[in-house]
Amino acid sequence: MTKPASNLQIDSSRLWETIHTTAQFGATPKGGVRRLTLGPEDKQVRDWFRTACEKAGLEVQVDGLGNMFALRRGRDMSKPPLGLGSHLDTQPTGGKFDGILGTLAALEVIRTLNDAGIETELPLCVTNWTNEEGSRYAPAMMGSAAFVGDFTVDDILGRKDAAGISVAEALDSIGYRGDRPVGAQPFSGFLELHIEQGPILEAEGKTIGVVENGQGVLWYDGKITGFESHAGSTPMNLRRDALATLSEIVLAIEAIAVELGNAVGTVGEAVIASPSRNVIPGEIAFTIDARSADAAILAQLDERIRAAAAGIAAKRKVEVALDLVWRKEPTHFDKTLVGAVESAANALGYASRRITSGAGHDACNLNAKVPTAMIFVPCKDGVSHNELEDATQTDCASGANVLLHTVLSLAGVAK
């Protein structure tokens, strides 16, 4: 017998068990997950996900970049499905929830509808996007970026990791280069549930973040070329020190972000070529990640970081090359879908607030092509991209319930 949709709740215990089941694929000693995209652990979780979706009655297809689409039929198959999901890959020292919660909660929504015998008007499509994290291959959110046409498929397939393995080779090695054309899957809209990855919801005692905007992102690959020389016999005023140069660049980025406000800047990687205790570093490769939710400030970040790097290079008589490898403008999510998320949270009695996403997400890419919205739930101390990443069973279930009722409001219940 069909249950009233207005009273429907997801199975909290089942969702929690599923989260911990998938955490075994790439489990780390500290309780986190290391599941780099297109590696053996990614294959394991993808195989699990495919099987789970098929058991739930979904038809699974895979496109040429490994993006996975699991379709639940609706009453009106002439209309595009409502998409829901996130990703299953992690950072090298990642946690159990980042991305995974959104994908598994989407699956739980399907299971809940199945249990209740509810058919939606629109079909539904649960999605797992390839390489959201960007920890093995750049850019991050690679699968969804190609899906919306920000990159060509051939460009992405040719990208290589630090070991020289291309995306094409990695896809083939795990058997997930599908035959569905990239970008061919239609959507009427898309919903992504995610942990906040920041401290705001927890600090304010809110259960649900109704995400309005996403920050714009600038990613640079940098290289400093100075001159290697003896650490003992080279006077300080005659040095062309690549590491000292990088130190100034790091502090300049910090100062620029603070001065502009509503901006952040980070140097997250730095590698000295041929390091030695008694050699002045002559060459360093490094990365920059700079973000703002304001398009004008994002443009200023780009201009001022480049100017600062050039000025420091001239002063220190070294060469600094900055290659902008990815630029994503700020995202403004669809007002109708954002309103549907907020209405679902209010109807369920959860404390909520409007919020801006500090991190990038697949939904930020998809918003350029289809109406999109996001739902946030708190994570402990705002920690993410860390094995200590944590969230409560109650909050995960609350987010999944908001996802469920947003789906019902947008996809409709078949009469």
Image (spheres, rainbow, N blue to C red):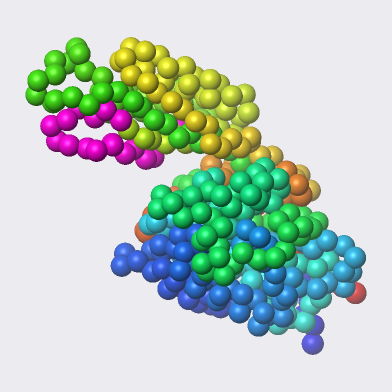
Q: Is residue 230 above or below residue 337?
A: above
Q: In which quarter of the image is the N terminus?
A: bottom right
Label tally: 0
Q: Is residue 376 visible?
A: no
Residue 369 place in picture, x, y as percent: 75, 47
Classify residue 206 as left or right of residue 253.
right
| Viewer-side residue, 83 vs 117 | 83
Q: Can residue 223 be seen in this view?
A: yes
Residue 344 forms part of the magenta stretch = no
Write the residue at 17% across / 16% down: 236
Q: In this view, does 252 lie above or below 136?
A: above
Write the residue at 13% across / 26% down: 231
Residue projecting furthest to the bottom? 1
Classify residue 412 as left or right of residue 85.
right
Residue projecting furthest to the left? 232
Query: Can you tell which quarter of the image residue 276 is in?
Result: top left
Residue 295 place in picture, x, y as percent: 63, 28
Q: In this view, does 400 lie above or below 166?
A: below
| Viewer-side residue, 284 vs 14 | 284
Classify residue 21 as left or right of residue 403.
left
Residue 11 place in picture, x, y as percent: 60, 76
Write the residue at 87% across / 62% down: 79
Q: Quadrant of the C terminus?
A: bottom right
Residue 282 forms part of the magenta stretch = yes
Residue 244 place in picture, x, y as percent: 27, 24
Q: Is residue 44 above or below residue 233?
A: below
Write the residue at 65% across / 76% down: 53
Q: Which contiguous range is marked in magenta?
A: 265-283
